[in-house]
């Protein structure tokens, strides 16, 4: 289906980019918090609170997504705006490595909230765009493939996190992923129109 529908292929590729961002954040944030607190155990405790902030952000993002789409008039604009906010927030998370102690923890928590809220808006809007391109009988299958794309993106970035972090550091790695996720917003630009199969005329009996 994605081969026939270039728009659907683009939307699925965005999911892979999102998986890269999630894996980079969720893998490196505990390491960063352990650095800030000085111990792995205390870093894990702080990460539990930061992760809770992320779940709360998901709820907030999901609740405001329809409003964002209405304000920006189209779903594609809302998705692009959400990705831009997520990329900027991840850039803020990258910049927060210059901070230490409580300031670094607070900055990480704020960036975490903004990233996950924006990502939740993008996922909801993108899901709507996917549903509009796929007939109801195949939507569950396509959304399963979308989930696999997310995991595939996470797999790819996880394999490269070691070399990336060694060469760029945690902040540099986050910054690189922020650029990657921002570039992925271009997949929404001039999204090909969906092809709708003709509906047969009703027959009279």
Image: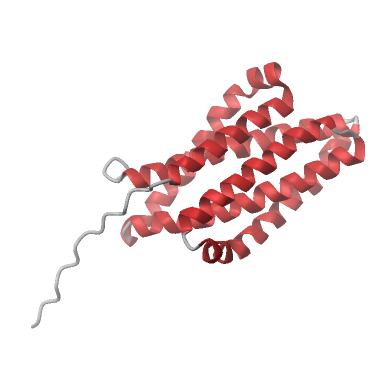
Q: Quadrant of the N terminus?
A: top left
| Picture residue at 67% right of the left edge, 61% below the top | 60
**121 vs 27, nearest the viewer:** 121
Query: In the image, is residue 136 above or below residue 54?
Result: below
Q: Position of residue 63 (x, y in %)?
A: 62, 65
**173 vs 55, nearest the viewer:** 173
| Picture residue at 71% right of the left edge, 57% below the top | 56
Query: Going by the picture, which residue comes out furthest to the left?
Result: 205
In the displayed structure, does residue 95 sit left or right of residue 136? right
Could you tell me if residue 45 is visible in this image?
no
Could you tell me if residue 93 is visible in this image?
yes
Q: Quadrant of the C terminus?
A: bottom left
Query: In the image, is residue 19 above or below residue 192?
Result: above
In the displayed structure, does residue 141 sit left or right of residue 53? left
Quadrant in the picture for residue 180 = top right
Q: Position of residue 115 (x, y in %)?
A: 67, 46
Quadrant in the picture for residue 32 = top right
Query: In the image, is residue 22 above or below residue 110?
Result: above
């Amino acid at each position: 289906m994605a081969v026939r529908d270039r728009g659907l292929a683009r939307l699925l590729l965005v999911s892979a980019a999102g998986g890269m961002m999630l894996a980079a954040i969720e893998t490196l944030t505990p390491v960063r918090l352990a650095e800030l607190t000085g111990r792995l155990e205390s870093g894990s405790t702080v990460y539990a609170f930061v992760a809770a902030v992320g779940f709360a952000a998901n709820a907030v993002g999901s609740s405001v997504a329809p409003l964002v789409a209405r304000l920006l008039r189209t779903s594609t604009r809302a998705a692009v705006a959400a990705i831009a906010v997520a990329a900027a927030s991840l850039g803020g998370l990258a910049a927060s490595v210059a901070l230490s102690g409580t300031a670094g923890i607070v900055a990480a928590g704020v960036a975490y909230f903004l990233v996950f809220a924006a990502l939740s808006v993008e996922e909801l809007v993108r899901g709507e765009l996917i549903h509009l391109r796929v007939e109801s009988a195949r939507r569950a299958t396509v959304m399963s493939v979308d989930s696999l794309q997310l995991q595939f993106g996470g797999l790819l970035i996880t394999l490269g996190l070691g070399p990336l972090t060694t060469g760029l550091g945690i902040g540099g790695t986050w910054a690189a992923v922020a650029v990657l996720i921002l570039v992925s917003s271009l997949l929404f630009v001039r999204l090909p129109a969906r092809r709708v199969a003709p509906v047969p005329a009703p027959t009279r009996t």
